[in-house]
Amino acid sequence: MASGFKINRQGIRQMVREIEREAAKTPVRVPVNAETSGGGSAGGGAVTGSELDLVAGWLLDWGYAYSKANPSLVPSVAEMMTAVGVEGFVPLVEPHVEVAVAGLEEAGLLKDGARTFGSAGMGLPVWLSAAGQREAAARIERRKDNRTRRVTCRDAVLRWVYEQDANGEPTNIAEIVASPYGWFNGAQFSAADLVEAVRFLRERRLLGGTDETPTIELAGTECIEQYGGVVGYLNRGDGAGVNVTVMGDNKGQLAVANRDVAQSQTNTNEVEALAIFAKALREFGQLLPPEQQPEYEEVATALEREAAKAEPNKSWVQGLIGRAKDLLEGAPENLHNLAQVTKVVLDIYNQGLS
């Protein structure tokens, strides 16, 4: 737990009650039935800030529920909603219905040929294709993925607070249930999901404020604007590449995988620099698959041999450094920005030559 962060248990209990009250009164709620509990992104995304995507997801879910009870009938949007018992959603659906249906048709999730002459708006037909049936069923299965739901809830809460703050609107977390950010594959996030998400984000200093009314922090803004989500932001040290900290004495101890680079060298002669370079290269090679390690080991050993000489052959050393750089630049992408490692060790080497 981050230093200074304390869980306000009384506040959390109050927040849960507020969220549940808000969820009970908000019109943006799909009643649970035997097959499905709501909408979401038609494309299968776990959360969306788009009302259009939310409506498209609802149409998929309601169409799936309707087809189970009436497999031979093709209803209009209005007829389907009445049959499923969600006619209270008409004011939310109607502004988006034509674009949503067109998008589902274009994606191949609705069957061709169901439209009749002059059909428009709430009179448009909803007839799921085989692909549409599969997608609707897959959405139901995705709702059962607890891990993905919790991770998605954190992203949704952070994005919602960011948007509310940018628009100068209140950030009472209970109100997220009335927005498209309050949904996971057609099911609303629970009060427990939201409480956990706020706690997690405040603990990591992405959100500030209180449990009930969080505020966006600079780190949260950076997460939203520069990274793909909370997981990507928290893993940015790994994603930024392999970073090297060289610490201390003339044996050149090396620490790999720190986010920032710090260099401290008490003696910068050429021999020490080459020894550090060799050690860095060997340790870096150990991060790679076994079949790629021998080349790194070979270059590291050659550099160590030069470092052991009273006067290393500078031309030979420069050739070895060039070979090492080529190896680093051709390393797997999952280690990222490998030129940074080369720059660190070359800087050390250049210090030794100066």
Image: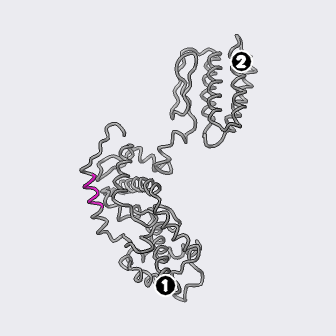
Q: Nearer the viewer, mark 1 or mark 2?
A: 1
The quarter of the image holding the N terminus is: top left
Label 1 SS: loop
8, 68: nearer the viewer: 68
Counting from the top left corner in percent of width and height, residue 241 is at: 57, 38
Start-end of magenta stretch: 12-19
Residue behind mark 1: 70
Residue type at mark 2 is Arg
Q: Earlier in the sequence, mark 1 or mark 2?
A: 1
Res. 305 mark? 2
Query: Which of the 4 quarters of the picture holds residue 328?
Result: top right
Q: Magenta residues: mostly which secondary structure?
A: helix
Q: Residue 290: image x %, image y %?
A: 68, 36
Report the residue at 37% width, 73% height from top. Answer: 31
Report x, y in % for residue 230: 46, 49
Say few, some or many: other residues with alpha carbon within 10 Å of mark 1 (under 14 / 14 to 19 / 20 or more).
few
Residue drawn 62% across the image and 32% down it = 284
Q: Residue furthest bottom?
A: 117
Asked whether 14 falls inside the magenta stretch, the response is: yes
Locate residue 326 relative to residue 247 in the image: left or right.
Answer: right
Q: Answer above or below: position of 342 versus 239.
A: above
